[in-house]
Amino acid sequence: MPLLVEPNYHPPSFLFNGHLQVIWANLCRRVSGVVYQRERIDTPDGDFLDLDWGRVGSDKLALLTHGLEGHSRRPYVLGTLREANRRGWDGLAWNFRSCGGDMNLQPRMYHSGATDDLHRVVSYAVTQGYCRIHLVGYSMGGNLSLVYCGREAQLLPAEVKSVAAFSVPCDLEASAWQLAKPQNRIFMWKFLGDLREKIEHKARMFPHLISVDGFSSIRNFKQFDDRYTAPMHGFADAEDYWHQSASGRYLQQIRLPALLVNAENDPFLSPSCYPRSFAAGSDTFTLEIPASGGHVGFILRSADQTYWMEQRAMDFVAVHNAEADVAEAQRRAVNCE
């Protein structure tokens, strides 16, 4: 199996750079045919998580984790869940705290290393009778999925069989500064504008803990994470948060099949987000670097708005599900001897 490959993906010719591919995928894509069933589960600290299910009656589950300021209704999530259903898999798209439509109850929200919430969702899925669970994550959600499978490898239920991650900032610090560059200013403004609305809501809920005074002076993630993410989630400062939560630190601890797809023209990622050397020496970790694709883009021309990314995710899942079938058949044969 190749461990460092360049897949044959080509975007439409009019989307000739990464910025255009990001914008098109976010503003122009419409995904139909997905009807969610919403379920809310409790967390051990007195909060809740909103889960959106797309069930077709399978005992296999694709568990999807969205990105920064995303949610289960983002086109890239809907597209992957639809593709999973088409291939006979149930799908579960969960929402980070504060991202499901209702503000969560605790002062904390979510962050790139909040594996406790992902573990809560995975553990709950196991109780629903799924024998095989494959994780798929995007951007921050991809980072979180990789951190979970590496740093928390000892906690993983046996039902978790693989992880696929797309457009992942494996080096959080370098990516934070990449987004702060002038060419990415429009995206930084959008992220900070969305985050401000949530911080204002939190300030009304917890005025003794959280303030929005001076928020307008925040220009980058260093300033935001120093003031909000770090203290709200138990980190010393932004650098401590980035260091502890960057998936690049934990790749070598992942023991199950893992796929990372980062486009070479992704405007959000630094060079350190492409772990070529590690992938070249790994038996279980596959790194794919398409020349194009942008950030969570990977656009294809198709009548039903199917994109390359969800096809690649489910192709990877299918391969490793087949391998699990073979391994299970071999175990049964040995037990019958």
Image (spheres, rainbow, N blue to C red):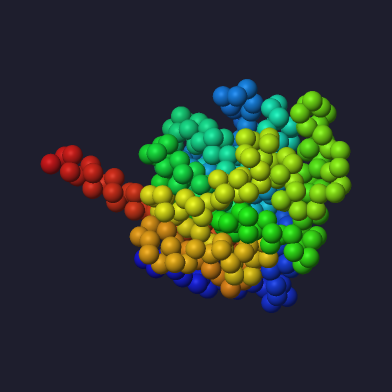
Residue with the most extreme front position? 236
Based on the displayed image, in which of its 4 quarters is residue 180 positioned?
A: bottom right
Question: How many labels were placed on the picture?
Answer: 0
Residue at 51% over, 55% down: 248
Vertical relation: 262 (above or below) 146? below
* Residue closest to the eye, 219 or 261: 219
Based on the displayed image, in which of its 4 quarters is residue 278 positioned?
A: bottom left
Q: Is residue 249 visible?
A: yes
Residue with the most extreme top position? 46
Quadrant placement of the N terminus = bottom left
Q: Where is residue 56 in the image (x, y as percent from the top left)?
A: 52, 41
Q: Is residue 25 visible?
A: no
Q: Where is residue 264 in the image (x, y as percent from the top left)?
A: 59, 70
Q: Is residue 82 left or right of residue 122?
A: right
Quadrant placement of the C terminus = top left
* Residue closest to the eye, 218 or 58: 218
Q: Where is residue 64 in the image (x, y as percent from the top left)?
A: 56, 46
Q: Is residue 197 left or right of residue 79?
A: right
Residue with the most extreme bottom position? 13
Q: Where is residue 225 in the image (x, y as percent from the top left)?
A: 70, 45
* Residue closest to the eye, 63 or 163: 163
Q: In this view, does 37 lie to the left or right of 250?
A: right
* Residue closest to the eye, 92 or 238: 238
Residue at 51% over, 59% down: 260
Residue at 68% over, 36% down: 231
Residue at 17% over, 43% down: 334
